[in-house]
């Protein structure tokens, strides 16, 4: 089908129309394209968008396996291959998430928080509530993490707390002082099992464009790093995010119109996202665990081993926040 036919048959929606036109343009202009397929609901749209055009032999589909994937996600990759007659390369991480957690430590709260805590742990920090200058003397070569600990970064305009300060996470400092972590915390699994694998694959494959699914309306640090659906990179390949501007309603319209089927993670397990199963960064990891317990019991046992300390510590922290808030509310009355 040519672009006019595709647009004629598209739903009446400017976001979808624009993504069809821009995708058409990108696929024509670039020669070696990597489309990252996660098996999630966003990547279902990416594959469908890419498959509408004739130049599809320019596209390599790749799934980066972190070593902690839902069986339903893997099944869904098979389904996509059958539906579109494509091959999705499965790229395994050299250092999987379980191995990274064992070697470096477990993720806790967020990428940023885990990074700062990891640095402080490396310096044998004693979680003391002292001014920055004193701590800098006690712990040389650790300034950035100590600045986080001491809330030394300026607030954002409007007075909003900077995400570089520990106060961004309510009562976290008080919690760490009262209950210092007794296990290694690290975000290294994100680096080794996700980022590095994709980076190497892109470099070795000589791709000139990477298509992947990020939506602005999802929020979060990663999304807010992008301003538009496209970035041109001098040294690495260019990046295109076809559904960057899509809202939840846009996705639903797309699914209905093109009869897109998401993985069982969504329609059967009731999850809102996929990705590394049971990642402690997920706010709703308890819901994910419950779904795993019911539908993928082996995975449930595995993640409870891999992230055991982080789950326990996160629960303790959440409980700590609840108690502090209740005490404050009582004090206000
Ligand atoms: S998303 Fe979570 S489990 Fe997956 S690599 Fe990153 S920190 Fe590790």
Image (tube, rainbow, N blue to C red):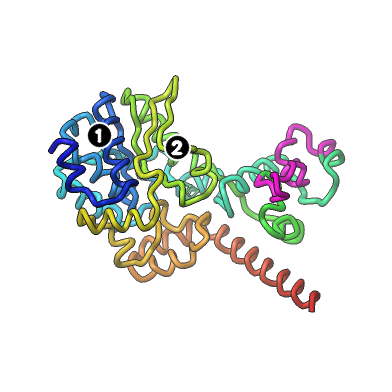
For marks 2 and 1, the one nearer the N-term is: 1
- Residue 146 appears anywhere in the view: no
Q: Which mark is residue 55?
A: none
Residue 18 visible from this viewpoint: yes
Which residue is located at x 12 percent, y 38 percent?
A: 1
Q: Which mark is residue 24?
A: 1
Can residue 304 be found in the magenta stretch? no
Horizontal side of residue 72 vs 154, given as left or right: left
* Residue 160, magenta (yes or no): yes
Label 1 SS: helix
Left or right, residue 221 beside residue 130:
left
- Region rendered in magenta: 136-163
Point out which mark residue 228 bears: 2
Is 87 in front, or is 69?
Answer: 87
Circle 2 sits in a helix, a strand or a loop, which is it? loop
Q: 297 or 47, which is in the foreground?
A: 47
Q: Quadrant of residue 193?
A: top left
Figure check: 119 above or below 254: above
Look at the picture and state if 51 lies above or below 167: above
Q: CA distance from mark 2 to mark 1?
A: 17 Å
x, y percent for residue 47? 25, 44
Image coordinates for residue 121, horizontal then vertical, percent: 68, 45
Tell me if 126 is positioned left or right of 43 in this view. Answer: right
Query: What residue appears at the point 29 percent right and 39 percent down from the top-left corner?
Result: 62
């Amino acid at each position: 089908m040519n672009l006019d036919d595709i647009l004629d048959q598209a739903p009446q929606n400017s976001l979808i129309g624009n993504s069809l036109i821009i995708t058409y343009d990108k696929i024509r202009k670039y020669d070696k394209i990597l489309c990252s397929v996660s098996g999630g609901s966003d990547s279902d749209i990416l594959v469908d968008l890419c498959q509408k055009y004739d130049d599809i032999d320019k596209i390599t589909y790749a799934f980066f396996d972190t070593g902690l994937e839902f069986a339903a996600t893997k099944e869904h990759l098979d389904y996509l291959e059958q539906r579109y007659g494509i091959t999705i390369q499965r790229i395994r991480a050299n250092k999987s998430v379980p191995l990274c957690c064992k070697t470096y430590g477990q993720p806790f709260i967020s990428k940023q928080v885990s990074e700062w805590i990891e640095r402080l742990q490396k310096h044998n920090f004693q979680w003391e509530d002292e001014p920055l200058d004193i701590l800098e003397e006690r712990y040389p070569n650790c300034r950035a993490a100590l600045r986080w600990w001491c809330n030394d970064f300026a607030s954002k305009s409007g007075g909003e707390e900077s995400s570089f300060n520990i106060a961004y996470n309510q009562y976290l400092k008080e919690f760490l002082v009262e209950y210092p972590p007794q296990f290694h915390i690290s975000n290294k699994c994100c680096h080794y099992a996700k980022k590095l694998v994709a980076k190497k694959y892109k470099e070795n494959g000589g791709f000139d464009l990477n298509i992947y699914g990020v939506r602005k309306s999802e929020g979060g640090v990663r999304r807010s790093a992008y301003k538009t659906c496209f970035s041109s990179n001098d040294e690495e390949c260019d990046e295109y995010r076809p559904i960057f501007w899509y809202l939840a309603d846009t996705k639903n319209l797309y699914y209905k119109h093109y009869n897109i089927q998401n993985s069982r993670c969504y329609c059967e397990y009731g999850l809102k996202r996929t990705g590394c199963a049971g990642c402690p960064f997920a706010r709703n990891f308890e819901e994910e665990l419950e779904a795993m317990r019911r539908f993928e019991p082996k995975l449930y046992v595995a993640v409870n081993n891999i992230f055991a300390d982080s789950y326990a510590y996160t629960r303790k922290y959440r409980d700590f926040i609840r108690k502090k808030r209740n005490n404050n509310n009582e004090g206000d009355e």
